[in-house]
Structure formats: structure tokens, C-alpha cells
Image (cartoon, helix red, strand yellow):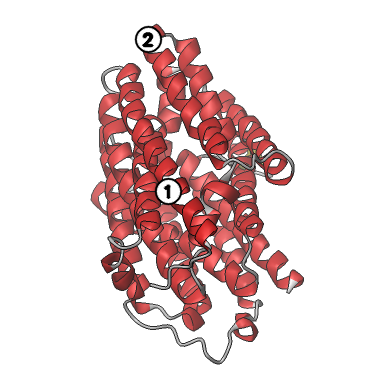
Amino acid sequence: MKKDIIKLFAVIALYALSGGMFYSFEELWMIDNMLSIRTVGIVFSLCSVVSVSLIFLCSNLIRQKYLKKFVLFLLMLKSLLLISLFMLNGSGYSVLIKFIVIIEYAIDSEIFTCFYPLLSMIKKDDKIYARRGLINSGFDYFSVLLGGFLVGKEILGIVFNYNTIVFLSFVCIVISFLILLTIPFGKYLSDEDKKEYNLLTKLVQNLNKDKISLNYLLFVLVGNISYYGILGLKTTLFTNDLGFSLQSFSVFSVVVGIIAVFIGTLILEKFTFKNNYINAFIKYGFRAVLFIIAIILSNKSVYFITLLYILLITESYTHVLDAPFINRFDDKLQLAFSNLREMFSYFGIAIGTFFCGILLTYDIKFNFVFALIFCILQVLFLFIAINLKKKEDNCDRKWLG
């Protein structure tokens, strides 16, 4: 079991290396291919909308016992799309590039959604859920440093540019595909595991009865609208509005990311409060306070401090603010609920990124106002979900669908 978990963590790490390099420089790669900042924002919004559609479709069709084969198929398809983008660089086929970017993003979203259900087939645990996120984020940040170091340099006769980064992302996906092939998930499935079709549809139909999940999903939705309303085009924001060069932003991203993973690990192991309201306020409530201060002072230094806090605390408290709501479900329903969560997540990303691109063309202050409004709603929905979950735990009840 432990060996298989380590292998799957290796797959997640390589996936994160690929995504970190590709998505960190994708904005700039697209701009190099004659797409405007506003167009990039709209494309990223469409990416999230298409992701929702794919997640909904796959959740209703894919049985748990076929999950490994499904992820392998998606990794293969993602690798083909990445190599296509590599070959289309500088071609001028902007419509085709936008189409491939949207499809690739949707496939990537579904792959990430499937990782925890795969892990939970081997071992279900709140800390495993958190470690998956920490590994993903740690290697994602490392890949940003690697990409920032490589871009603009010539090594062994190879000139590294944004397009070379696309090719390196392709290589990481191919290796992750090969490792996933070696993990025998079949031995972890029981004979009774006969996953029904249309579980996601049934979950949606029962949301009006499951107030805990409804408020948690609304928390995810408005939380991503808030976060991506200000950080949806992070590279553009830091380089154009806060005066970072590409190289300094890459180093900053990695340093902050590594510190964030370290903080998340410390909180996971040692510094989690028993009172979940306190955990929620530290991560989200104080963020709203900083938004208010930044809006009032309208100062670049305060903007920077606020964004720094958001980035540093991003990896923390997922084991108490996310995992318990997902692990309420048995293995059959968990995949469907994870996909439902991602649907709400990507709706939020789509809305937030769309407005981020628009508001950045005016003044960054408007992004902070936008983010504050949805951050307040985020805290409200989370507090309600925590309260309802606490009552459920006290009554020792379990929602069965």
C-alpha cells in the first residue's frame, strides 16, 4: 500500500511540474502568439466553463473501477495537445491555439479531480488529502523556479524560451503516464464495488436536503471568484501592475510557494486549532480585513502585502476546511462529489478570471473591491457549513444520499 501511495504521489509531483511550468508561462506564451491580455482572460474563463461540462459528463459515465484507465487516457490526450501547442508556436493559427488551450485546460482539470479519488481507493484520510495538495503545490512552485531559470538561457546548444517550456511540460506528462501504468488499483477494489451511473446527477438533486454540502459548495464557488478575481492573471498582475520582472516574479513565486508549503505542513502537523471557526478566520476572515485596508489606503505596498498573505496561507488548513466535507461520502459517492466540487470551483475560476482580465485594464483597486465582496460571502458560507457539520458530528449522523 505504502509503495503504491508513493508512486501516485510521484505521478502528482510530475503532473504538478508539468502544470507549473506550462500554466505559469502560458499567459506570456499566448501573448507571444499575438493574443491580447483581455483575450487571454476570456480564453481562461472559457477554459473553466468547458472544464465544468467535461467534469459533469465524466462523473456520470465513469465507473470507479475504470478510473485508472480513464486518467491514463486523459494523460495521453493531454500530452498530444501539449505537443500540438509546441508545434503551433509562431504559426499564426490563433483560433486553433485558443481551441487547443481550452480543451487542454478542461482535460487537466478532470485529471486533477481524479487524483484524490485514486488515492482514497488505496487509503482514505484527511491528512492524505492535505499532503496531496502540498505535494502538488510544492512541485508546482519548484517548476516555476525551474522555468524562470531556464527561460532566456542556452544550455547544451538548446535555447530555452516559452515554447521549450511547453515541450518540457509534455515530457513530464509522458513520464507520469508511465508511472501510473505500474500502480495496481484493482487489488484495492472490493467485489461489491459496482458504482452506479448518474451519481453526480443524484447528488445535485439531493443538495436541497444536504445543507452542509450546499453551503460548502457555495463557499468553494464564491471563494474562487474572490481569489481569481484578483489573482486570475497573476503573472500579468505582478509584472505589469506591481513592477516585477519575469525573472524576479519567478523567484518570488517559488520562494513564497515553498514557504507556503512549509507553513501548510507545520499547520497540518502541529498548529491546527480545535475550533474550526478560528482556522477559518485565520485563512479567510483576516484576508477580508486586509482587502479593506488595501482598498482604503490604495497603496502598492499594501496591495503587495495583502497578496503575499493570500499566497502564504493558500496551502494551509485544507485538512480541516475541505477534507472533512469530502470524506463524509463513501468511495462510490466521493468521486462524484469531488467532481461536483470541481464544477463549482471552475465556475468560480471562470467568473473570477473573466472579471480579473477586465478590471486589470482599469485599476487594480477595482480587483480588490471585487475580491472583498466575494470573500465576505465565502466566510459566511464556510461558517454556516462548519456549524452544520459540527451539529452532524454531535448527532453522529451520516448523509447516505
Please name the residue that numbered disc 2 is placed on. Answer: 296
Quadrant for the N terminus, please: bottom right
Whole-Å distance between the Cαs marked 2 and 1?
Answer: 31 Å
Is residue 271 or residue 237 the one in the foreground?
A: 271
Is residue 20 or residue 117 the one in the foreground?
A: 117
Residue occupying image coordinates x 58% and y 87%: 190
Is residue 187 or residue 77 the one in the foreground?
A: 187
Give x and y (percent) for residue 257. 61, 36
Foreground disc of the pair 2, 1 = 1
Q: In screen coordinates, is 311 left or right of 32? A: right
Mark 2 secondary-structure assignment? helix
The amino acid sitting under disc 2 is Ile
Residue occupying image coordinates x 49% and y 60%: 326
Question: Which of the labelled discs sits on residue 319, or is there none?
Answer: none
Please name the residue that numbered disc 1 is placed on. Answer: 385
Is residue 137 or residue 181 the one in the foreground?
A: 137
Res. 244 visible in picture: no
Q: Earlier in the sequence, mark 2 or mark 1?
A: 2
Give x and y (percent) for residue 64. 48, 79
Mark 1 secondary-structure assignment? helix
Q: Is residue 352 above or below residue 305?
A: below
Give x and y (percent) for residue 113. 46, 61
Q: Residues within 10 Å of mark 1 (few under 14, many from 20)?
A: many
